[in-house]
Image: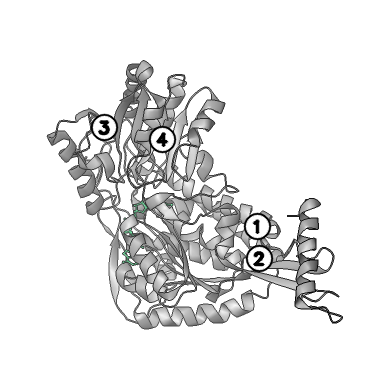
Amino acid sequence: MSASNPSSAAAGLGPGGPADPEHDPGATYALEPERTAALTALVVSSTGEEVPTHTPLTGQRLAMMPQSSAQDVEEAFARARAAQREWARTTLEERSAILLRLHDLVLEHQDEIMDLVCWESGKARKDAFDETLHVALTARYYARTAKQHLRTERKIGVVPGLTRVELNRVPKGVVGIIAPWNYPFTMALCDGIPALLAGNAVVTKPDAQTMLSALFGARLLREAGFPADLWQVVAGPGRVLGSEIISRADYICFTGSTATGKLIATQCAERLIGCSLELGGKNPIMILRDADLDRAAEGAVRASFSNAGQLCVSMERLFVADQVYDRFVEKFVARTKALRLAPGLEWGSDMGSLISQDQLDTVTAHVEDAVSKGARVLAGGRARPDLGPYFFEPTILEGVTPDMTCFGDETFGPVISLYRFSDEADAVARANEGQYGLNASIYSRDGKRARAIARHIKCGTVNINEAFAATFASLDAPMGGMRESGMGRRQGAEGVHRYTESQSVATQRLLRFAPVLGLSDEAFAKIFNANLKLMKKVGRP
Ligand code: NAD
């Protein structure tokens, strides 16, 4: 894959800065047709129908994407089920070895993946890099912890020495994965990796806007050595194909908005199948009075503007202690104004484009609504059509009040609201307002105090002296949302156990659970009562 005429990423294009004469917003991006065709051929489709996909960088067409029908979803599940039966017989060692090859392949193809992700999503290359990093980390983590999470475990039997209990982790079968566009490569793969490791097959529906990145992931899975039919990709509108997938799957992993998550949970409930839901957030960051302000300002910029704010764990509400508010805000605003916005595939841009007109409309509406009701813009605040159709400046708002949409609604864009606090308990209460509970961040030089505060924050992850990467990349720890930010967890033991059924197998020796030698039921009950008292006395659980 190569850019036919990649844009020279413009240097020094900070928000509001002068346009670079070298920069050509009309520069074309194209994929080599044979390579695109090799990817689109991986979609299960018999309809003959295709829809175009476009790059947000210029709005130009990238590919014609085959569309899947209900019959195609049926076919995808049939293939996946057949492949899963064989796959479930492989050993954890064999599965882990394939995952380690996937790790290497991601690094080998890193540049190609980053090009594709930038083209499809419009994000900055450094944000595309995070995707390759996250997939490689996930592949390695699950390969190296497969036995720890999935081997048969011994459990405590009811009668010491006579009841042997084993816990098996049995694969669910075929897992349906419905993924969003914001991290198209990592969201396509990172939830599927533990599903495969646990012995499942996957049928996935990536977002229509970012199919190529997801298909590239499917290609790498095959190259790494997973059987071809084990991972099926279907393409089409979410509300149509989503239902088709849910009606056939043994488990659903969904990442996307809270509104869609609720619809999916309802459909899963009707079939009594489990689901994990990774949903939206309105994430708070707290700068305590003893924070290292330079570190906090750097972190707050990443927290707010990574991936142009289109990141589930990015921050949209910033609470700053009164004593340091002015000094912190000065540093935060200066760093934000120095960010370089540029379209293109090269390194050097701090922030890329939003994905679509819809995203641009939402971000613009949130900012305009806040400003019209009295909020002040300390940085950014406007779209940048000179850079690309969907660029929007990193924006800091002050004076946001509950009547403004961006006070409580997820913007999912580069917009952060500043709030002062004088009392930490009050700041925690405000951070806990609203229906979400995904990620939070606390900056303080006193780690112990910050960890104590974290226990009162109703979020699934809390980062101390870091924005989001510390929890997101610590794959041994579960990641997910409380309240309306989700159900279930990805990563760690929970991230793989969700794709298994627990099966307990107890083997009983000698003793039977019934009166023997002519004992009456009453005598038998007395022996059991004596046994209960003894077991408690000797400290048995
Ligand atoms: P979305 O809910 O509109 O779409 C997500 C996926 O669901 C897409 O593949 C879409 O085609 C599909 N879909 C849409 N309607 C459907 C339906 N009725 N049934 C089944 N599938 C359907 O979300 P989005 O706007 O694409 O993504 C942004 C949202 O995702 C934000 O709210 C963000 O916070 C959230 N997100 C959360 C996490 C997390 O880990 N918690 C990660 C990334 C994104």
Rounded to the nearest whole Å, what is the CA distance between mark 2 and mark 4? 36 Å
Residue where numbered disc 2 is placed: 95
Rounded to the nearest whole Å, what is the CA distance between mark 4 and mark 3? 16 Å
Please identify the quadrant where the C terminus is shown. bottom right
Residue where numbered disc 3 is placed: 15
- Residue 261's place in the image compared with 48, above or below, is above
- Residue 45's place in the image compared with 148, above or below, is below
Report whether 524 appears left or right of 271. right
Mark 3 and mark 1 lie on one chain; the one further toward the N terminus is 3
Rounded to the nearest whole Å, what is the CA distance between mark 4 and mark 1? 30 Å
Judging depth in this view, the residue of 332 and 38 nearest the camera is 332
Identify the amino acid type marked 4. Arg
Q: Where is residue 527 shown, x and y percent of the image?
A: 80, 67
The crowding category of the residue bearing disc 2, from other C-alpha atoms within 10 Å (few below 14, some 14 to 19, many at least 20), is many
Judging depth in this view, the residue of 529 and 7 nearest the camera is 529
Identify the amino acid type marked 2. Arg
Q: Where is residue 168 shown, x and y percent of the image?
A: 68, 68
Front position among marks 4 and 3? 4
Identify the amino acid type marked 3. Pro
The crowding category of the residue bearing disc 3, from other C-alpha atoms within 10 Å (few below 14, some 14 to 19, many at least 20), is many
Residue at figure coordinates x 51%, y 57% from the top left = 190
Mark 4 and mark 1 lie on one chain; the one further toward the N terminus is 1
Residue where numbered disc 4 is placed: 302
Quadrant housing residue 98: bottom right
Mark 4 beta carbon near ligand 1 (under 8 Å): no
